[in-house]
Image: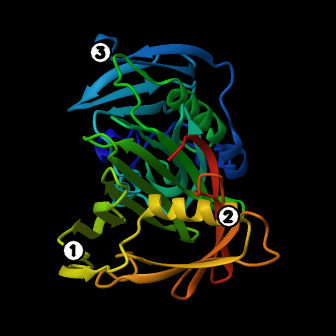
Amino acid sequence: MLALLPNCGGGSPAAQSAQGASEPNNASATNAKPFDFDATIKREASGLKELGVQGPDAAWSAKVPAAAEPKLSRAENVMLVDIPIGSESAVRCQVFADTLDAAGTLHGVIKESAQTVEYRSIAPSGVGVLGGVPAAFLETVYVTETEGGKGAGGLKLAIQVREQESLLCLHDELGYRQTFKDISNAFFSSFQVRNAPPNANTYSEISKLHIGDTDVGYSWTRVTPGEKPGERTFSYSNTTLMPVSPKDVIFNDAYELYAYDAKSVLQSATWVDGNNGQISMKVTLKRGAGAKYAYEGEAKGKPLKGVLDAPHGLGGPLDTAVRLKKKLKAGAPFELVLPEYHPSVDPTTLIDVKYSHRKGDPARQVAVTLREHTITTEIDDDGMAKASSLQIGKNKLTIERLKSEGHP
């Protein structure tokens, strides 16, 4: 991934020397202008014009603001689009033919480049829905050695993982933060694939996660028909960029996949968690004879295998939504306890999860209690969570729906 960076690394031409000039010259050091970090980081491009760019054989196209014609090249199976903005470093956008782990990919760029630069700040800088697909942004400031002495640089990244391909934009130069966002937004929003397969989702929902005013991630829920009539597949992906200090972020990707038969009975499920680019858990669950489900996988480096007894059935997100829809429609207070499997909490047993709506609560508010944690949730007319909040220590994590289409 580091090879695809435009400049990031020791001696980068985009790194601004703290002694005044990033290139040596004949002027004496006493005549060098002092480095103004505040002014440098606030600079933006101007006079950009919207220009089009196409992939090989017009397989895909996009439009971006640029100072000159974008240049297209290839590195192995990745298409590179260098977009001039009238500065020392172009914005580079990349088109991957595969779906990537969003947080893991960002972590990989930071980890590789940290071998040659010293990061002073790393922070998530926004989440949005662009062209119907979620995207996440990250900003950094680093120091490195240049020919003119100690230098400062800024690497900005944006990633969008789509149904069939992934897009990554980056810019290695101090400042131009809004310029970078504008170009990334335009590239992601306008990106079109020729002969793209039709959208098979019957339901799609995108939410963002934030702590205070900081967007720290997003989730994407989709429901698609199964292979046989009446079957359905429920998929959920979650990407978080959780800051734990001014220069440390935990990069997490989580995936859940549930398969239901025509009677809405859960047949199988898969959970995958990845932290900082490494898989920390992968567990599969399959329905067996009677009321038993077999689980197998690995968590925290240890193998897992066992059988769960579910005499009252084993719920999943779709049947839970149906139950909550009915309960809330009745309008009375209720307390619903359902046995659920949450391997990230405990992969060896079922956990009783309590859903409660008390007298005096807002009409669609449900408290979800899972062991010591309680999530306050607003439920929509389909029984799906529209907004949720969870207290984590002194901080409040809020999940807010940005967009939904169809019905589950």
Drawn side of residue 59 relative to residue 68, left or right = left
Q: Residue 403 vs residue 113: left or right?
A: right
User: Which comes sooner in the sequence, label 1 or label 3?
Assistant: 3
Residue 274 at x, y = what percent?
34, 65
Q: Tell me, yes or no, whether the two marked residues, 3 and 2, touch with CB atoms within 8 Å.
A: no
Within 10 angstroms of label 2, few (less than 14), some, or many (20 or more) residues? many
Point out the frontmost of discs 3 and 2. Answer: 2
In this view, the residue in front, 390 or 144, is 390
Give me the C-alpha separation between circle 3 and circle 2: 53 Å
Q: Is residue 311 left or right of residue 377?
A: left
- Residue drawn at x 53%, y 60% as measured from the top left: 321
Viewer-proximal residue among 109 and 305: 305
Q: Which residue is mark 3?
A: 56
Looking at the picture, the colour scheme in use is rainbow
Query: In this figure, which residue is indicated by the disc labeled 1?
Result: 290
Looking at the rendered structure, the secondary structure element under dot 2 is: helix
- Residue at which label 2 appears: 328
Say if residue 170 shows up in the picture: no
| The quarter of the displayed image where residue 369 is located | bottom right
In this rendering, the answer to whether 173 lies above or below 64 is: below
For the residue carrying disc 1, how many other residues have a C-alpha within 10 Å: few (<14), some (14-19), or many (20+)?
Answer: few
Q: Is residue 210 above or below residue 77?
A: below
Q: Residue at x 46, y 58 (%)?
A: 318
What is the x, y in percent for residue 80?
Answer: 35, 28
Return the x and y of residue 12 as percentages of the image width and height: 42, 44
Among the two numbered marks 3 and 2 on one chain, the one whose residue lies closer to the N terminus: 3
The residue under label 2 is which amino acid type? Leu
Three-letter residue code for mark 1? Gly
Comparing labels 1 and 3, the label whose residue is closer to the camera: 1
Q: Is residue 344 above or below residue 37?
A: below
Residue 159 visible to the viewer: yes
